Image (cartoon, helix red, strand yellow):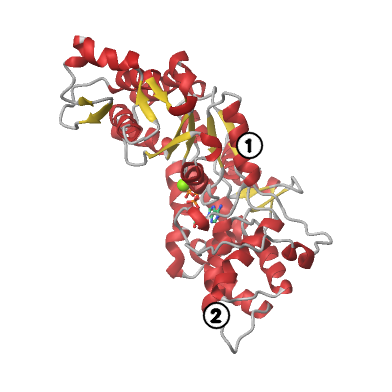
Amino acid sequence: MFSDIIIVKNFDYKKFVNNFDKNIIVMRNIVGSPARGNNFFRRDAEIRKIIDRIENGHNLQLIAPRRIGKTSILFHLLDQKVEGYAYVYLDTERIDNEEDFYKKIIKELCKVEEISISKRLFQRFREEARFLNRLKSIKILGNEIAFNEENLDLNYYEEIKNFLSGIELEENMQLVLLIDEFPQTVVNILEADHGETVNAIKFLQSNRELRQDPEVNRNVRFIYTGSIGLTQTVSNIQASAFINDINVVEIAPFNFEEGVEFLDRLSEPKGLKIPKEAALYLLKKIAWIIPFHIQLAMQEIISLSSNTRAIDQDLIDEAFNNIVEYRNRSHFEHYYSHLKKEFKGISFEFADKALKQIAKQGKLDRTVLYDMGTGFGIKENYRSIIDTLCYEGYINNNGNHQFYQFNSPIVRMWWQKHICE
Ligand SMILES: Nc1ncnc2c1ncn2[C@@H]1O[C@H](COP(=O)(O)OP(=O)(O)OP(=O)(O)O)[C@@H](O)[C@H]1O
Ligand SMILES: [Mg+2]
């Protein structure tokens, strides 16, 4: 699903590179952290899709395998205030309960310049004893509010609902809450409850109620994403019904042209000129062209190239192999550790063996996988494990449905070198 196999037909490299905007902004190769400001390479198609859906009144989840650039897109929306929305970014990775989740949103909202409290809400804060009692925790300063952490005696869901339905934004702006690592919060709640699903489901339910509250909905849109999939996380606890109102936007890898341009942008400030043949050769090797893999390759190319060594196929091959050196393990170890969290017992053993075989052989016939599943005694659900591996961006059977292969040759190399026995 995510693995567009790149076929380069009659690609006119020179014409393409000459068409670049010459007022090039210097882009730095920050490997691993979300790209911000000038370091963000435009994602016009994705941003357009997101804004169109927001304008149509949808709440969204951005889905893509790890490291494709979801967080970078959220930061871009936030930093550029794209299309005049007021954005609030929240990383909820460490949150493991509903109260803290809503509390964090309220705290972040208090920082947004464009938000003011509507007269109606202001009156309520002032007049209702219910709210006056809480002034210790939420203080009204003029027409602003401040948050005092000491008082924990609040129903934060009610607070946020009142808050979001009572805020007014400058010039009828709308507010977009960018909630990163939301699925991890669901997992954290489950772990805190030792696998008991009641609170996790209640959390998903209250989020849905909040999104669908007509007063909230007037002002506010939600965009969720995370490094683990929401759909899978929620379906594991049979709670899909609580997210089926959320519209899905897939974030794809770069296309070939974007890959060439990104490579050029990264090499320019270093005074490097990657020759046409070498650039095309590299991108064909990367195949699954995500900005992160271009960054990793670029880092290795820079350390190998010198006045006496040209950037040719030989250097590209060496740089490519160096990407999966042990020193880069922090960029790859999560692929394997995630499997251990995603699948338990026999399911893990099957997924593990299947991926090792695919890595070793390059391609694996689906009938071999079927036999492997039968061997593990999971004839019934081996398909859903394979589907999950496809959905999460490990493998695909695009092109020829009979065979499964790794999406990314780089990840396959990592598997061969560090995971396969
Ligand atoms: N549009 C972009 N321009 C430049 N670099 C990018 C872009 N998108 C992603 N990257 C780079 O790719 C890497 C991963 O980016 P990011 O953290 O945004 O991905 P992610 O999908 O949120 O990852 P995860 O699933 O691990 O949360 C980072 O090194 C980042 O700098
Ligand atoms: Mg991210």
Mark 2: C-beta under 8 Å from nearest atom of ligand 1: no
Task: Reply above or below: 350 against 33.
Answer: above
Query: Which amino acid is tagged 2?
Result: Leu
Q: Disc 1 versus disc 2: distance between alpha carbons? A: 39 Å
- Can you tell which mark lies on residue 304? 2
Residue projecting furthest to the top: 128
- Residue 384 visible, this orientation: yes
* Number of numbered tags placed on the structure image: 2
Q: Local crowd at mark 2 within 10 Å, few (<14), some, or many (≥20)?
A: some
Residue 228, image x, y percentages: 47, 42
- Quadrant in the picture for the N terminus: top right
**In this rendering, would 311 be left or right of 32?**
right
Q: Residue at x 66, y 64 (%)?
A: 22
Q: Which one is in front in this view, the residue at disc 1 or the one at disc 2?
A: 1
- For label 2, the SS is helix
- Can you tell which mark lies on residue 248? none
Q: Nearer the viewer, residue 383 or 375?
A: 383
Residue 369, image x, y percentages: 64, 46
Q: Which residue is mark 1?
A: 49
Residue 315 location, quadrant: bottom right
Whether residues under marks 1 and 2 lie with C-beta atoms below 8 angstroms apart, the answer is: no
Residue projecting furthest to the bottom: 308
Task: Reply above or below: 59 against 413.
Answer: above
Q: Nearer the viewer, residue 208 or 138?
A: 138
Q: Residue at x 22, y 10 (%)?
A: 127
**In this rendering, would 240 be left or right of 206?**
right
